[in-house]
Amino acid sequence: MKITSKVKVFTGIRPSGDLTVANYLGAIEPILKMLEEGVEPMVFVADLHALTDKEPSLAKKYIHEVVADYLALGLDPEKTTIFVQSVIGSQLFTLMSYLARHISVAELLRVPTLKDKLRKNAREETANALLLLYPVLMASDILMQRAEQVPVGEDQVAHLEVTRLLAKRFNDRYGNVFPIPKAYQVESLRILSLKGEGKMSKSVPEGAIFLTDDIENAVKKVKGAVTAIEGEMTDGLESNVVLAKGLCKSEEDRTRIDRIIAEHMASKKVMGEFKKMLAKVVSEFLTDFQERRKEVVKNSGLIESVLKRGDRIATENANETMALVEKAMFK
Protein backbone atom coordinates (compact mmCIF):
# COMPACT_ATOMS: atom_id res chain seq x y z
CA MET A 1 0.00 0.00 0.00
CA LYS A 2 1.34 3.45 -0.93
CA ILE A 3 1.46 6.00 1.87
CA THR A 4 -0.24 9.27 0.96
CA SER A 5 0.01 12.49 2.91
CA LYS A 6 -2.95 14.80 3.29
CA VAL A 7 -1.35 17.64 5.23
CA LYS A 8 2.13 19.17 5.01
CA VAL A 9 2.22 20.84 8.45
CA PHE A 10 -0.21 20.18 11.30
CA THR A 11 -0.54 21.89 14.68
CA GLY A 12 -3.08 22.42 17.45
CA ILE A 13 -4.33 25.13 19.79
CA ARG A 14 -6.11 24.62 23.10
CA PRO A 15 -9.38 26.50 23.60
CA SER A 16 -8.56 28.39 26.77
CA GLY A 17 -9.36 31.96 27.70
CA ASP A 18 -6.92 34.69 28.56
CA LEU A 19 -4.15 34.22 26.02
CA THR A 20 -0.96 36.04 26.96
CA VAL A 21 1.76 37.67 24.88
CA ALA A 22 3.86 34.61 25.74
CA ASN A 23 1.24 32.41 24.02
CA TYR A 24 1.50 34.65 20.98
CA LEU A 25 5.29 34.46 20.74
CA GLY A 26 5.53 30.75 21.57
CA ALA A 27 2.58 29.26 19.68
CA ILE A 28 1.10 31.73 17.22
CA GLU A 29 4.07 33.56 15.74
CA PRO A 30 5.64 30.27 14.49
CA ILE A 31 2.46 29.64 12.48
CA LEU A 32 2.65 33.15 11.02
CA LYS A 33 6.27 32.50 9.99
CA MET A 34 5.18 29.30 8.23
CA LEU A 35 2.66 31.33 6.23
CA GLU A 36 5.40 33.80 5.29
CA GLU A 37 7.49 30.85 4.05
CA GLY A 38 4.64 29.68 1.83
CA VAL A 39 3.54 26.79 4.06
CA GLU A 40 -0.23 26.42 4.40
CA PRO A 41 -0.75 24.71 7.78
CA MET A 42 -3.71 22.82 9.17
CA VAL A 43 -4.64 24.00 12.67
CA PHE A 44 -7.09 22.28 14.99
CA VAL A 45 -8.84 23.65 18.07
CA ALA A 46 -8.08 20.94 20.63
CA ASP A 47 -11.31 20.89 22.62
CA LEU A 48 -10.93 17.16 23.35
CA HIS A 49 -7.42 17.70 24.72
CA ALA A 50 -8.90 20.26 27.10
CA LEU A 51 -11.00 17.51 28.72
CA THR A 52 -7.91 16.35 30.63
CA ASP A 53 -8.41 19.31 32.97
CA LYS A 54 -11.58 21.20 31.92
CA GLU A 55 -15.32 20.57 31.81
CA PRO A 56 -16.66 20.07 28.24
CA SER A 57 -18.92 23.14 28.50
CA LEU A 58 -15.96 25.34 29.39
CA ALA A 59 -13.84 24.02 26.52
CA LYS A 60 -16.71 24.58 24.06
CA LYS A 61 -17.23 28.13 25.33
CA TYR A 62 -13.75 29.18 24.24
CA ILE A 63 -13.72 27.67 20.71
CA HIS A 64 -14.95 30.77 18.87
CA GLU A 65 -12.99 33.03 21.22
CA VAL A 66 -9.64 31.40 20.44
CA VAL A 67 -10.34 31.33 16.69
CA ALA A 68 -11.16 35.05 16.83
CA ASP A 69 -7.87 35.62 18.68
CA TYR A 70 -5.84 33.70 16.08
CA LEU A 71 -7.46 35.47 13.14
CA ALA A 72 -6.88 38.85 14.80
CA LEU A 73 -3.24 37.92 15.39
CA GLY A 74 -2.73 37.40 11.67
CA LEU A 75 -3.73 33.85 10.72
CA ASP A 76 -4.85 34.02 7.09
CA PRO A 77 -8.11 32.03 6.72
CA GLU A 78 -7.47 31.74 2.97
CA LYS A 79 -4.18 29.92 3.55
CA THR A 80 -4.90 28.07 6.80
CA THR A 81 -7.32 25.21 7.42
CA ILE A 82 -8.82 25.54 10.91
CA PHE A 83 -11.15 22.92 12.37
CA VAL A 84 -12.58 21.82 15.71
CA GLN A 85 -11.15 18.54 16.99
CA SER A 86 -14.43 17.15 18.35
CA VAL A 87 -16.03 17.30 14.88
CA ILE A 88 -14.10 14.09 14.15
CA GLY A 89 -14.23 12.86 17.75
CA SER A 90 -15.69 9.44 17.01
CA GLN A 91 -13.00 8.71 14.40
CA LEU A 92 -10.26 9.99 16.72
CA PHE A 93 -11.26 7.85 19.68
CA THR A 94 -11.60 4.80 17.44
CA LEU A 95 -8.12 5.37 16.02
CA MET A 96 -6.81 6.02 19.54
CA SER A 97 -8.08 2.60 20.65
CA TYR A 98 -6.37 0.94 17.67
CA LEU A 99 -3.07 2.74 18.33
CA ALA A 100 -3.16 2.18 22.10
CA ARG A 101 -2.68 -1.54 21.45
CA HIS A 102 0.84 -0.76 20.25
CA ILE A 103 2.24 1.00 23.32
CA SER A 104 2.57 -0.08 26.95
CA VAL A 105 1.49 1.79 30.07
CA ALA A 106 5.13 1.81 31.19
CA GLU A 107 6.16 3.54 27.94
CA LEU A 108 3.46 6.17 28.37
CA LEU A 109 4.49 6.88 31.95
CA ARG A 110 8.01 7.61 30.71
CA VAL A 111 6.84 10.51 28.51
CA PRO A 112 8.48 13.54 30.20
CA THR A 113 5.59 15.97 29.77
CA LEU A 114 3.16 13.41 31.18
CA LYS A 115 5.41 12.91 34.20
CA ASP A 116 5.50 16.68 34.69
CA LYS A 117 1.70 16.96 34.55
CA LEU A 118 1.34 14.17 37.10
CA ARG A 119 3.86 15.83 39.38
CA LYS A 120 2.36 19.32 39.12
CA ASN A 121 -1.36 18.70 38.84
CA ALA A 122 -2.25 15.25 40.11
CA ARG A 123 -0.90 12.03 41.52
CA GLU A 124 -1.28 8.75 39.66
CA GLU A 125 -3.93 7.77 42.22
CA THR A 126 -6.15 10.76 41.36
CA ALA A 127 -5.31 11.65 37.74
CA ASN A 128 -8.01 10.73 35.22
CA ALA A 129 -7.17 8.00 32.71
CA LEU A 130 -7.50 10.41 29.78
CA LEU A 131 -4.32 12.12 30.96
CA LEU A 132 -2.42 8.84 30.56
CA LEU A 133 -3.77 8.41 27.03
CA TYR A 134 -3.07 12.03 26.09
CA PRO A 135 0.06 11.16 24.03
CA VAL A 136 -1.95 8.55 22.11
CA LEU A 137 -4.76 11.03 21.46
CA MET A 138 -2.16 13.51 20.19
CA ALA A 139 -0.74 10.81 17.91
CA SER A 140 -4.25 10.11 16.63
CA ASP A 141 -4.73 13.79 15.75
CA ILE A 142 -1.54 13.86 13.70
CA LEU A 143 -1.89 10.48 12.01
CA MET A 144 -5.59 11.00 11.24
CA GLN A 145 -4.68 13.88 8.93
CA ARG A 146 -1.59 11.99 7.66
CA ALA A 147 0.61 14.99 8.36
CA GLU A 148 4.20 15.18 7.15
CA GLN A 149 5.49 17.72 9.67
CA VAL A 150 4.53 18.95 13.13
CA PRO A 151 5.88 22.14 14.73
CA VAL A 152 7.50 21.24 18.05
CA GLY A 153 9.49 23.03 20.69
CA GLU A 154 11.90 21.27 23.02
CA ASP A 155 9.14 20.38 25.49
CA GLN A 156 7.05 18.53 22.88
CA VAL A 157 9.66 16.42 21.13
CA ALA A 158 8.73 13.40 23.28
CA HIS A 159 5.09 13.58 22.17
CA LEU A 160 6.12 13.56 18.53
CA GLU A 161 8.41 10.60 19.22
CA VAL A 162 5.40 8.69 20.60
CA THR A 163 3.53 9.51 17.38
CA ARG A 164 6.43 8.33 15.23
CA LEU A 165 6.78 5.15 17.31
CA LEU A 166 3.08 4.31 16.98
CA ALA A 167 3.08 4.99 13.24
CA LYS A 168 6.09 2.72 12.73
CA ARG A 169 4.66 -0.09 14.87
CA PHE A 170 1.29 0.11 13.13
CA ASN A 171 2.93 0.13 9.69
CA ASP A 172 5.19 -2.80 10.62
CA ARG A 173 2.15 -4.82 11.67
CA TYR A 174 -0.41 -3.84 9.02
CA GLY A 175 1.43 -2.28 6.08
CA ASN A 176 2.33 1.27 5.11
CA VAL A 177 -0.75 3.19 6.19
CA PHE A 178 0.77 6.25 7.88
CA PRO A 179 3.51 8.68 6.86
CA ILE A 180 6.11 9.03 9.64
CA PRO A 181 5.80 12.69 10.65
CA LYS A 182 8.92 14.78 11.13
CA ALA A 183 9.54 17.73 13.43
CA TYR A 184 9.08 21.19 11.97
CA GLN A 185 11.57 22.79 14.33
CA VAL A 186 10.46 25.99 16.02
CA GLU A 187 12.41 28.13 18.44
CA SER A 188 11.56 27.34 22.06
CA LEU A 189 10.87 30.62 23.81
CA ARG A 190 10.58 30.67 27.57
CA ILE A 191 8.91 33.95 28.46
CA LEU A 192 9.06 34.43 32.22
CA SER A 193 6.58 36.12 34.51
CA LEU A 194 7.23 39.85 34.85
CA LYS A 195 7.46 39.10 38.56
CA GLY A 196 10.24 36.58 37.99
CA GLU A 197 8.19 33.64 39.27
CA GLY A 198 8.51 30.93 36.62
CA LYS A 199 6.90 31.05 33.17
CA MET A 200 4.41 33.76 32.28
CA SER A 201 0.97 32.27 32.84
CA LYS A 202 -2.52 33.17 33.94
CA SER A 203 -1.87 31.48 37.30
CA VAL A 204 0.23 34.57 38.20
CA PRO A 205 -1.91 37.30 36.56
CA GLU A 206 0.08 40.23 37.92
CA GLY A 207 3.14 38.90 36.08
CA ALA A 208 1.37 38.21 32.78
CA ILE A 209 0.37 40.50 29.91
CA PHE A 210 -2.99 39.24 28.62
CA LEU A 211 -4.17 40.08 25.12
CA THR A 212 -7.35 41.41 26.74
CA ASP A 213 -5.55 43.69 29.21
CA ASP A 214 -6.46 47.36 28.99
CA ILE A 215 -3.43 49.47 28.13
CA GLU A 216 -3.24 51.22 31.50
CA ASN A 217 -3.18 47.91 33.38
CA ALA A 218 -0.57 46.42 31.03
CA VAL A 219 1.72 49.43 31.46
CA LYS A 220 1.32 49.18 35.24
CA LYS A 221 2.47 45.53 35.09
CA VAL A 222 5.49 46.48 33.01
CA LYS A 223 6.45 49.20 35.48
CA GLY A 224 6.43 46.58 38.25
CA ALA A 225 8.55 44.10 36.29
CA VAL A 226 11.68 42.64 37.84
CA THR A 227 14.83 43.83 36.04
CA ALA A 228 18.51 43.66 37.07
CA ILE A 229 21.26 45.72 38.62
CA GLU A 230 23.66 47.52 36.28
CA GLY A 231 25.96 45.19 34.36
CA GLU A 232 23.97 42.01 35.08
CA MET A 233 21.95 39.92 32.63
CA THR A 234 19.45 37.91 34.67
CA ASP A 235 16.99 35.33 33.31
CA GLY A 236 14.16 37.78 33.96
CA LEU A 237 15.78 40.63 32.05
CA GLU A 238 16.77 38.34 29.18
CA SER A 239 13.14 37.17 28.96
CA ASN A 240 11.87 40.77 28.93
CA VAL A 241 14.31 41.63 26.13
CA VAL A 242 13.00 38.68 24.07
CA LEU A 243 9.46 39.86 24.82
CA ALA A 244 10.18 43.45 23.80
CA LYS A 245 11.95 42.53 20.56
CA GLY A 246 9.37 39.88 19.73
CA LEU A 247 6.44 42.28 20.02
CA CYS A 248 7.91 45.38 18.41
CA LYS A 249 7.16 45.94 14.74
CA SER A 250 9.87 48.43 13.76
CA GLU A 251 13.56 47.90 13.22
CA GLU A 252 14.15 51.29 14.82
CA ASP A 253 12.62 50.06 18.09
CA ARG A 254 14.70 46.87 18.01
CA THR A 255 17.86 48.91 17.50
CA ARG A 256 16.92 51.13 20.42
CA ILE A 257 16.36 48.09 22.66
CA ASP A 258 19.78 46.70 21.69
CA ARG A 259 21.37 50.05 22.49
CA ILE A 260 19.70 50.25 25.92
CA ILE A 261 20.82 46.73 26.84
CA ALA A 262 24.37 47.42 25.65
CA GLU A 263 24.45 50.46 27.93
CA HIS A 264 23.03 48.40 30.79
CA MET A 265 25.78 45.80 30.36
CA ALA A 266 28.26 48.67 30.46
CA SER A 267 26.92 49.39 33.98
CA LYS A 268 24.81 52.41 33.06
CA LYS A 269 21.48 53.05 34.81
CA VAL A 270 19.05 52.56 31.94
CA MET A 271 16.47 50.11 33.30
CA GLY A 272 13.93 52.91 33.63
CA GLU A 273 14.38 53.68 29.94
CA PHE A 274 14.09 49.97 29.10
CA LYS A 275 10.78 49.69 30.98
CA LYS A 276 9.43 52.71 29.09
CA MET A 277 10.44 51.04 25.84
CA LEU A 278 8.83 47.74 26.86
CA ALA A 279 5.65 49.59 27.88
CA LYS A 280 5.56 51.35 24.48
CA VAL A 281 5.99 48.11 22.56
CA VAL A 282 3.38 46.25 24.65
CA SER A 283 0.88 49.14 24.34
CA GLU A 284 1.23 49.29 20.56
CA PHE A 285 0.91 45.52 20.19
CA LEU A 286 -2.20 45.28 22.39
CA THR A 287 -3.87 48.28 20.75
CA ASP A 288 -3.33 46.80 17.28
CA PHE A 289 -4.55 43.35 18.34
CA GLN A 290 -7.66 44.61 20.12
CA GLU A 291 -8.68 46.76 17.15
CA ARG A 292 -8.18 43.83 14.76
CA ARG A 293 -10.19 41.53 17.02
CA LYS A 294 -13.13 43.94 17.04
CA GLU A 295 -13.11 43.83 13.24
CA VAL A 296 -13.02 40.01 13.23
CA VAL A 297 -15.96 39.78 15.64
CA LYS A 298 -17.85 42.47 13.72
CA ASN A 299 -17.50 40.43 10.50
CA SER A 300 -20.63 38.37 11.03
CA GLY A 301 -20.24 34.78 9.95
CA LEU A 302 -16.46 34.86 9.39
CA ILE A 303 -15.56 32.43 12.18
CA GLU A 304 -18.43 30.08 11.29
CA SER A 305 -17.38 30.14 7.64
CA VAL A 306 -13.73 29.40 8.47
CA LEU A 307 -14.66 26.50 10.76
CA LYS A 308 -17.25 25.09 8.36
CA ARG A 309 -14.63 24.81 5.63
CA GLY A 310 -12.02 23.35 7.99
CA ASP A 311 -14.43 20.88 9.56
CA ARG A 312 -15.40 19.59 6.12
CA ILE A 313 -11.78 19.04 5.05
CA ALA A 314 -10.84 17.39 8.36
CA THR A 315 -13.86 15.07 8.18
CA GLU A 316 -13.07 14.02 4.61
CA ASN A 317 -9.47 13.27 5.61
CA ALA A 318 -10.58 11.36 8.72
CA ASN A 319 -13.05 9.20 6.83
CA GLU A 320 -10.44 8.35 4.21
CA THR A 321 -7.80 7.55 6.86
CA MET A 322 -10.14 5.30 8.85
CA ALA A 323 -11.09 3.44 5.68
CA LEU A 324 -7.38 2.78 5.01
CA VAL A 325 -6.73 1.79 8.64
CA GLU A 326 -9.62 -0.64 8.91
CA LYS A 327 -8.98 -2.13 5.48
CA ALA A 328 -5.41 -2.87 6.60
CA MET A 329 -6.42 -4.22 10.02
CA PHE A 330 -9.42 -6.33 9.12
CA LYS A 331 -8.50 -7.66 5.68
Image (cartoon, rainbow, N blue to C red):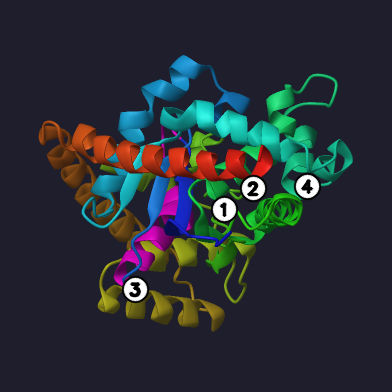
The CA span between labels 2 and 1 is: 6 Å
What residue is shown with label 3? 37
What residue is shown with label 2? 198
Q: Residues within 10 Å of mark 1 (few under 14, many from 20)?
A: many
The CA span between labels 4 and 2 is: 22 Å
Quadrant, the N terminus = bottom right
> Is 204 displayed left or right of 99 in the figure?
left
- Hey, which residue is sitting farthest right in the picture? 106
The disc labelled 4 sits on which kind of residue? Val
Mark 2 vs 1: CB contact within 8 A: yes
Which residue is pictured at 67% across the width and 53% down the height?
167
The disc labelled 3 sits on which kind of residue? Glu
Q: Report the magenta residues as a range.
A: 15-36
Residue 296 x, y percent position in the rendering = 17, 40
Q: Which mark is residue 192?
A: 1
Label the magenta part by its dominant secondary structure.
helix
> Is 245 displayed left or right of 138 in the figure?
left
Q: Secondary structure at mark 3?
A: loop
Is 177 rendered above or below residue 249? Answer: above
The CA span between labels 2 and 3 is: 33 Å
Is residue 273 at all visible to an observer of this figure?
Answer: no
Which residue is pictured at 21% across the width and 54% down the height?
78
The CA span between labels 4 and 3 is: 32 Å
Q: Secondary structure at mark 2?
A: loop
Which residue is pictured at 68% across the width and 31% down the height?
97
The CA span between labels 4 and 1 is: 24 Å
Q: Which mark is residue 111?
A: 4
Mark 3 vs 1: CB contact within 8 A: no
> Which sits earlier in the primary sequence, circle 2 or circle 1?
1
